[in-house]
Image (cartoon, grey):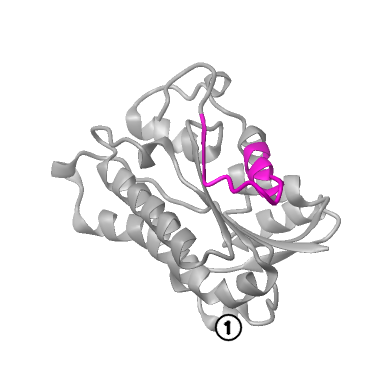
């Protein structure tokens, strides 16, 4: 059976992706909340919790991962604010999780990915395609994530690398975003996490003659970013 590692797997898009892959992959569920990860794992036929602090991921954390078919980077943070009101620490924290941790985990897992001819999925955002007022630190991290994925694709031609750009998704993270924006959380206007997961599965199961490098998924109604 193929193997997959999904970060941010305790909730939202990450948990939906883990469940979508659970029937075809041995899934490692990456994140900090072991209890929540265990609840997701209990629903899957072959899954294990992979507790990790992504900002401090190390060789020891990936020891024993010999081959890896799928790596899904779904973990992320967002702290909104205009440039004039955003201190350096917010920029550092956002870049650390949304970019640096992705780059480092990928680097550590490259030998396992190469052995399997693996596929790396970077869950980006509409903010990775367009920067809006009040979103600049987050958008900058997502533009950087896009550049990372593009560079990885060129440097590692034996791997497949897909960037997925969802619009707003009905998750706890989106609830927090709407609180920061001072607006109502309206899940009926947003994508379902399972919809994003299906798009990711589509990229993973494309035929050998197809490499889906970028996927944009937007809600049928509501804001696009």
Residue 70 drawn in magenta: no
Task: Report the span colored magenta.
Answer: 198-217
The residue carrying mark 1 is 60
Task: Say what secondary structure mark 1 lies in.
Answer: helix
Identify the residue shown where x is 26% and y is 42%: 136
Closer to the camera, 19 or 199? 199
Choose top left, top right, bottom left or bottom right for residue 92: bottom left
| Horizontal side, residue 20 vs residue 140: left or right | right
- Counting from the top left corner in percent of width and height, residue 157 is at 53, 64
Tell me how many marks there are: 1
> Residue sitting at 45 percent across and 71 percent down?
104
Q: Is residue 116 above or below residue 217?
A: below
Judge whether 162 appears above or below 169 on screen.
below
Q: Residues within 10 Å of mark 1 (few under 14, many from 20)?
A: few
- Magenta includes 214? yes
Residue shown at the point (51%, 69%) measured from the top left: 105
Q: Residue at x 51, y 79 (%)?
A: 58
- Is residue 109 placed above or below 203 in the rendered structure? below
| Quadrant including the N terminus | bottom right
- Residue closest to the far top: 221
């Amino acid at each position: 059976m193929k193997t997959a590692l999904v970060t941010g797997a305790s909730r939202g898009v990450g948990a939906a992706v883990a469940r979508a892959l659970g029937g075809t992959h041995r899934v490692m569920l990456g994140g900090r909340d072991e209890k929540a990860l265990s609840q997701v794992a209990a629903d899957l036929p072959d899954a294990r919790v992979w507790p990790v602090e992504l900002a401090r991921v190390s060789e020891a954390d990936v020891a024993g991962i010999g081959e890896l078919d799928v790596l899904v980077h779904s973990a992320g943070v967002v702290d909104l604010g205009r440039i004039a009101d955003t201190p350096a620490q917010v920029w550092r924290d956002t870049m650390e999780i949304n970019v640096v941790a992705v780059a480092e985990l990928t680097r550590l897992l490259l030998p396992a990915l190469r052995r399997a001819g693996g596929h790396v999925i970077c869950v980006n955002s509409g903010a990775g395609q367009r920067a809006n007022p009040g979103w600049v630190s987050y958008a900058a991290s997502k533009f950087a994530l896009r550049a990372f994925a593009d560079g990885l694709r060129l440097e590692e031609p034996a791997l497949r690398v897909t960037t997925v750009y969802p619009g707003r998704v009905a998750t706890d993270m989106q609830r927090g975003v709407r609180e920061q924006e001072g607006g109502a959380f309206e899940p009926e206007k947003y994508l379902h996490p399972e919809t994003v997961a299906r798009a990711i599965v589509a990229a993973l199961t494309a035929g050998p003659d197809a490499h889906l490098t970028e996927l944009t998924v937007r809600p049928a109604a509501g804001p696009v970013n």
